[in-house]
Image (cartoon, rainbow, N blue to C red):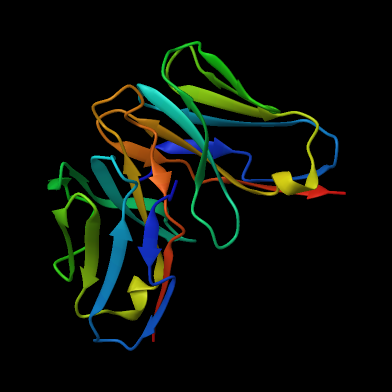
Amino acid sequence: GQQLNQSPQSMFIQEGEDVSMNCTSSSIFNTWLWYKQEPGEGPVLLIALYKAGELTSNGRLTAQFGITRKDSFLNISASIPSDVGIYFCAGSRNQFYFGTGTSLTVIP
Amino acid sequence: DAGVIQSPRHEVTEMGQEVTLRCKPISGHNSLFWYRQTMMRGLELLIYFNNNVPIDDSGMPEDRFSAKMPNASFSTLKIQPSEPRDSAVYFCASSSQGLGRSYEQYFGPGTRLTVT
């Protein structure tokens, strides 16, 4: 079953605003990944994190691997309409687990 | 470079029929994963293969589901007999486990299955 709690569940923001979402677990993970899924498509890998404390950017996206190894954060700066979609976190230990997703709507 | 290829993209079938979903992983990747996505349960890992060998099939719902990987470039997920509760989007993903970025899974576009 699900072991990752992702929040918020949904977000409605104005274009240009920054976005923050997070993922927490009761267990330690060795790897954290963030994916984006658009309607009718498969999840697309955005950022992969491999070390506790690691901070990695991909354009306007920045993700961090929490120091406790039980959480991760994704920030999107200066949102644009094409950022809409569902963002999933995923953690890996011996198995691979997905979060429940954050649905992002950007209002032009 | 071609990504993960899945076929068919959409499948509508009647309860009791056999359904076969197909996947071609990214060339050079040695791990392949089958997922099911529903609104109620989110993304669930069904089974994964490493070097064509099934490693973990604990997510396979029941004996009606079976998966094979006869070679490094092809895998199938079969449901027989299908039931309405099998309706979902089925994703295939692949990765290069054993190398530096072993947990970066790349997903196909999915197969939307509807069982009536």
Q: Nearer the viewer, residue A26 or A66?
A: A66
Q: Which quadrant of the structure image shows residue A30?
A: top left
Name the one closer to the observer, B115 or A81: A81
The quarter holding residue B94 reads: top left
Q: Position of residue B84 (x, y in %)?
A: 35, 80
Return the residue nearer the eye: A10 or B7. Answer: B7
- Residue A88: horizontal and vertical position, in percent? 52, 42
Q: Residue B43 location in percent, x, y?
A: 41, 52
Query: Which residue corresponds to the image point at 40% horizontal and 32% vertical from the top-left?
Result: A91
- Quadrant where the image shows the C terminus of chain B: bottom left
Counting every numbered tag in the picture gives 0
Residue B39, compared with residue B97, is above or below; it is: below
A61 over B114 or under it: above or below? above
Identity of the residue drawn at 23% across and 63% down: B76
B25 or A62: nearer the eye? B25
User: Is residue A25 something one can see in this rendering?
Assistant: no
Q: Position of residue A100 (x, y in %)?
A: 50, 46
Q: Up-down: is A56 above or below B83?
A: above
- Residue A104 in the figure: left or right of residue B110: right
Residue at screen point 39% across, 58% down:
B5
Q: Residue at x 75, y 28 (%)?
A: A77
Residue B46 left/right relative to A98: left
Residue A33 in view of the camera: yes
Q: What is the residue that sits farthest to the front in this orientation? A: B1
Task: Name above or below for residue B34 compared with residue A5.
Answer: below
